[in-house]
């Protein structure tokens, strides 16, 4: 687990402050801004690599309805299936990822075709929705293994449980890059670029170990 508070306590001294209180009272960059840089870095990782993944079972499926709003923390669906409604017979229906162009190639009336859902599309509907094909004829639950946004990194909510502690410096470098890149009398663009390059190296290492994002 990585804790952005540890990164903050490390970064403030390397940014020229004597203490957290000094940074808060007199800083050219403030603790909330440093947390924001860490949050931006974590959100970047949620796209870049497969480190923030989870099982979502929050989406009920209703017979006759083919389009559903995705959870707010959804980034990309890695695997999806429809589980039958509790107390109703039936088997789990695995869904195959299918772009909308292929749906048209398969069935020119795909949007209204009804049946046991066998496919899902992330680009057939509006942004932030998932479309099931055929339109389901039975109710159940859409369950997904997906890449997710981590929770917002902020004071009092600084822990990222999915990140192993060996990646603690990733958030530290994000804070240093953001702090030295912020326009101020203390800006050091060359150091901001240096810390940014370190983040790029971490990206490559993390992608090698956890796989690329989708």
Image (cartoon, helix red, strand yellow):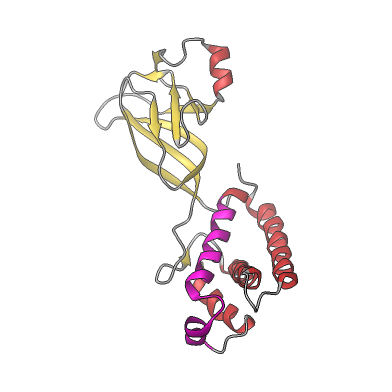
Residue 124 % position (x, y): 50, 25
- Out of 76 and 188, give the one closest to the viewer: 188
Give the residue furthest to the top: 108
Query: Compared to 137, does 148 lie above or below?
Result: below
Dividing the picture into quadrants, the one containing residue 131 is top left
Give the residue furthest to the left: 87
Task: Specify the segment rendered in magenta.
Answer: 19-46
Query: Compared to 46, does 34 lie above or below?
Result: below
Residue 38 % position (x, y): 55, 65
Work out whether residue 49 can be spotted.
Answer: no
Dividing the picture into quadrants, the one containing residue 105 is top right
Residue 21 % position (x, y): 47, 86
Give the residue furthest to the front: 185
The residue depicted at 51 percent of the width and 65 percent of the height is 36
Please identify the dominant SS of the magenta region: helix
- Direction from residue 85 to residue 123 in the image, left or right: right
The residue depicted at 64 percent of the width and 48 percent of the height is 211
Instruction: Please check the rendered image and state whether residue 29 is part of the magenta-colored stretch, yes or no.
Output: yes
Query: Compared to 73, does 115 lie above or below?
Result: above
Instruction: Please check the rendered image and state whether residue 89 is part of the magenta-colored stretch, yes or no.
Output: no
- Direction from residue 154 to residue 60 in the image, left or right: left
């Amino acid at each position: 687990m990585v804790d952005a508070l540890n990164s903050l306590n490390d970064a403030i001294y390397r940014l020229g402050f004597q203490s957290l209180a000094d940074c808060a009272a007199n800083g050219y960059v403030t603790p909330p801004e440093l947390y924001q840089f860490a949050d931006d870095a974590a959100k970047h990782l949620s796209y870049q690599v497969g480190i923030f993944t989870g099982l979502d079972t929050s989406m009920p499926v209703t017979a006759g309805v083919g389009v559903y709003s995705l959870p707010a923390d959804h980034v990309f669906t890695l695997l999806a299936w429809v589980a039958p409604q509790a107390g109703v017979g039936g088997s789990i229906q695995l869904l195959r990822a299918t772009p909308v162009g292929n749906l048209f190639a398969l069935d020119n009336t795909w949007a209204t075709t009804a049946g046991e859902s066998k496919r899902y599309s992330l680009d057939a509907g509006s942004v932030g929705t998932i479309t099931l094909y055929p339109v389901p004829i039975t109710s159940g639950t859409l369950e997904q293994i997906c890449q997710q946004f981590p929770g917002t990194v902020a004071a009092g909510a600084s822990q990222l449980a999915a990140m192993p502690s060996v990646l603690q410096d990733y958030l530290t470098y994000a804070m240093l890059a953001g702090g030295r890149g912020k326009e101020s009398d203390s800006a050091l663009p060359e150091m901001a670029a240096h810390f940014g390059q370190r983040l790029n190296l971490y990206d490559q290492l993390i992608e090698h170990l956890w796989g690329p994002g989708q």
